[in-house]
Amino acid sequence: MAVEIVTVPDLGGAESVDVIELSVAPGDAVEVEDSLLVLESDKATMDVPSPFQGSLVKYLVADGAVVKVGDPIAEIEVADAEQAPAAEPVAEAQPVAVEPAAAELAPAAAPAQTSSEQLILVPDIGSDDEIDVIEISVAIGDQVEEGDTLLVLESDKATMDVPSSHSGKVIKILAAEGNKLRTGAEVAVLEVTSAASPEPVNSPEPINSPEPAKAPEPAPVAAAPAPAAQVTQTDSSPSDSVYAGPAVRLLARELGVQLDKVTGTGPRGRVQKDDVNNYVKAALSSAPTATAGAGIPQVPAVDFSQFGDIETVAMSKIQKLTAANMQRNWLNVPHVTQFDEADITELESFRKSLKDEGEKRGIRITPVSFLIKALATSLQANPEFNRSLAGDGENYIQKHYCHVGMAVDTPRGLVVPVIKDADQKGIWDISAEIASLAASAREGRLKPAQMQGGCFTLSSLGAIGGTGFTPIVNSPEVGILGVSKSQIKPVWNGSEFAPRLMLPLALSYDHRVINGGDAGRFMTHLVKLLSDIRHLAL
Ligand code: CAO
């Protein structure tokens, strides 16, 4: 294994840029071209792709740092050359036309077709000026047809799509948002496949010799539509005044989206393709039936700068996902929240009695460990809480496994790792798993599989405070327990008020699947378990 340093690539003229997102976690595997981090200049955001395949050792910069071309940004551990498979050298991807491995691999495999590399250039744009790239419209691996937009340029006067002069698969993108390009500049390399000559190839020459790629073919490029023709001025709807490129406008038209309703997240509020897609996703998920969602009035956009100093803060991916999920769940699920308190006086004294043993084992037991165990037991006793509504709306899916999700508050946002088979685990194992999942969550190291499969969610704000809150069901689960901070309260024991440690509980449920009676039984069972944890052992 060797450690390679990744540096800031050419920034297309920008002197220094901000790091606005670290996209992978240390220890994660990365492929060539996976985005390592996101940089932002005053004109554009740009992903920095990994030039190596391997695993991220660490970042050499922090979120918010200011960097310039050539600065070291990350260390990647890559397999040594002798350990690496034959095809791996392709991973050193920066040069344009270096694909030796493909030539060696191709002859035996594809007798019917030949493929070659085709360099795509910026066509004649009517001036010799350099123009800003404001959007890369394709990704590596995309199949494009002749005429499809590869990227969008913007001058002072117009935006224009750069169309592909060939059909093929995008294997390299040679420009980035924020670059400045002029006529003839390199845009991308396509793998172009064509029918093979009927004669077998006798010569030992590799089938896909790189010459075609090196010889830019201006003729087909010149056939590209005149740039000005791509500028969209077809109607005079409110969308016209929205800052968006032609490719985005086309997408919006195809999807029937009014651009003035979409919030642009690009530089200077520019609407990007993802914004349109996210708008459609949100609209679809908030309108699952003909009767719901469609008429929800929009909250008007407000220009807060008229009231005082403001700044726009980019949301992390997790924060965006949480926002979309919460809105979807809030709009779809008819929520009811039921409250109770569990007397955890004995539970707490038992938990404290385990402190020494916990120190020996290196495991910290908190009330959350007992809550997870108690929830798993309650789910088994009340199986209607371990259901989801089937997609047809006419059946329940009854789960015969018991995985409990646990909301974890992290600097990047809220995540919910899942403790699998919590019903089959003891308190020590659950405690160790809580600590390890919460640590992974806070370090951004959770794998998708560790956040999937939950049957029910626990949201504990007990360590933070508060007397109660109404959690939102994490649909398609049908129940969530919100736990607040325990307090000593005077409780009447039949002859006197006694000081007891009371834990506030709030159970939100999906009233399509759970009735009030079900919820009452679930909560009563849970309170009984927490108040006398000997029942957990039964
Ligand atoms: N009442 C009083 N004290 C409590 C408590 C409660 N209900 N729950 C935990 N505590 C105490 C613990 O006992 C611990 O104290 P000691 O070390 O003295 O025993 C202390 O609070 C700190 O606990 P912790 O936060 O380190 O660990 P935890 O097991 O209680 O919680 C986790 C783990 C991951 C649930 C928690 O860290 C977390 O992220 N909570 C936030 C969840 C959240 O954001 N929910 C909202 C979702 S919707 O927006």
Image (cartoon, rainbow, N blue to C red):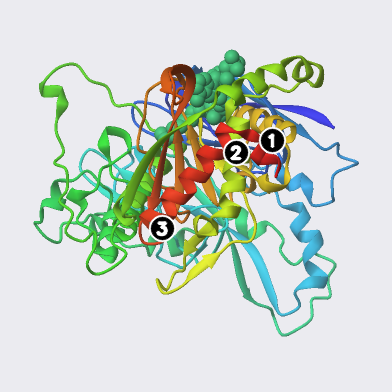
Q: Is residue 229 above or below residue 308?
A: below
Is residue 315 left or right of 362 when viewed as pictured?
A: left
Q: Nearer the viewer, residue 429 or 63?
A: 429
Q: Quadrant of the C terminus?
A: top right
Instruction: Give the residue type at disc 2.
Output: Ile
Mark positioned earlier in the residue sequence (2 or 1): 2
> Which of these two is toward me, 120 or 308?
308
Residue drawn at point x = 76 percent, y = 52 percent: 100
- Which of the two residues, 120 or 523, is positioned nearer the viewer here? 523
| Place of residue 502 in the rendered image (x, y in percent of width and height, measured from the top left) | 46, 24
What residue occupies the far bottom of the structure in this picture?
198
Residue 372 marker: 2
Please report contact status of discs 2 and 1: CB closer than 8 Å, yes or no: yes
Q: CA distance from mark 2 to mark 1?
A: 8 Å
Q: Is residue 346 visible?
A: yes
Q: Residues within 10 Å of mark 2 (few under 14, many from 20)?
A: many
Position of 10 relative to 181 (above/below): above
Determine if the C-beta at disc 2 is less than 8 A from ligand 1: no
The residue tagged 1 is 430
Quadrant in which the N terminus appears: top right
Quadrant housing residue 419: top right
Element on which disc 2 rests: helix
- Label 3 to label 1: alpha-carbon separation: 27 Å
Q: Residue at x 66, y 17 (%)?
A: 352
Q: Are marks 3 and 2 in contact (CB under 8 Å)?
A: no
Q: Is residue 294 left or right of residue 219?
A: left
Q: Position of residue 195 (x, y in %)?
A: 64, 79
Q: Residues within 10 Å of mark 1 (few under 14, many from 20)?
A: many
Kind of element beneath mark 1: helix
Between discs 3 and 2, the one toward the N terminus: 2
> Which residue in the structure is indicated by mark 3?
514
Say which of marks 3 and 1 sits in front.
3
